[in-house]
Image (cartoon, rainbow, N blue to C red):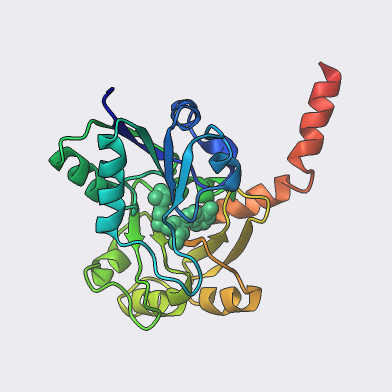
Amino acid sequence: MRNGMVSLVGAGPGDPELITVRGLARLRSANVLVYDRLVHPALVAEAPDEAERIYVGKAAGKTTLDQQTIEALLIERARRGLWVVRLKGGDPFVFGRGGEELAALIGAGVPVEVVPGVTSAIAAPAAAGIPVTHRHFASAVTFVTAHEDPAKITSSVDWDWLARASGTLVILMGLRQVWAICTRLIAAGREADTPAAVIASGTLPEQRVVRSSLGGLAAAVADARLRSPALIVIGDVVRFADLFDQSASQPFSSILASQIACN
Ligand code: SAH
């Protein structure tokens, strides 16, 4: 029997065209596809028809497979000699528990490779015209995870330090805590007029961007009734979204169409 293996693959930020060439190749050769909630259905469809597809994301009102069960599943299928593609939203190692799965597979002696993905932490701001770093406005960027519980914000995060840190802050999993986060940062010394934005469904056709100041962001987000997945960007680079908006008064698709017509 041939040896099985696991490819830990990043699916990219949302738009199915933003998976890597290697990621798509792995997906097209999979015997088993194990995927999460944020993976686009068009990518799930890329696996061969005969591949086993196993959804391990959260469904509303239902419990998720716990992490150990997912790891045991990957190990068991690989030991059967199958090629398992573990497809995760964005990059597998950015707030995706990819590191835990990698360690479990190595521990079980299962051959494993990592195919990095385009993380939403960079791509969602980019799709809204926000460069997370800029030579003149931000020489550093910090990625932070908020908390699943809207009443709390993650206590392992040093919010006082973040409030004083220079550069851009990108906060994932923070939509429901946007008020608590902004209030905490302002209390710890960040200027309330710091530019801030929330990007929901970044890179997808339903992408929405809400821009405000740190002090006004929570109210603006509540008015807009944004839905997850969404992330928060805080820092001077958010101003670039205005520039991008002005240039976007002519849709890119029509610019592209006229270019093609000229060639
Ligand atoms: N590994 C993923 C992140 C998983 S955590 C990555 O690298 O992108 C899930 C969080 O990612 C969501 O709560 C949200 O904050 C963010 N996210 C994922 N996709 C997104 C998208 N298309 N637009 C905005 N935020 C997104």
Q: Position of residue 252 (x, y in %)?
A: 74, 39
Q: Residue furthest bottom?
A: 151
Q: Residue furthest front?
A: 1
Residues 223 and 228: in front is 228
Q: Is residue 99 above or below residue 112?
A: below
| Quarter holding residue 179 | bottom left
Which quadrant, please, contains the N terminus? top left
Is residue 235 in view? no
Residue under the image location 50 percent in, 64 percent down: 196
Q: Is residue 211 visible?
A: yes
Q: Nearer the viewer, residue 187 or 199?
A: 199
189, 52: nearer the viewer: 52
Left or right of residue 51: residue 4: left
Looking at the image, is 196 positioned above or below residue 18? Answer: below
In percent of width and height, residue 142 lies at 33, 54
Measured from the top left, where is residue 89 in percent x and y? Answer: 45, 48
Total residue callouts: 0
Question: Which of 218 and 200 lies nearest the eye of the viewer?
Answer: 200
Quadrant housing the C terminus:
top right
Instruction: Say whether residue 253 is left or right of residue 190.
Output: right
- Is the residue 164 above or below the residue 166 in the image? below
The furthest residue to the top: 263
Where does residue 151 sit, x and y in percent of width and height? 37, 83
Q: Quadrant of residue 74?
A: top left
Residue at 31% across, 53% down: 70
User: At 53% from the left edge and 63% from the top edge, which residue is drawn?
Assistant: 197
Q: Residue at x 58, y 56 (%)?
A: 201
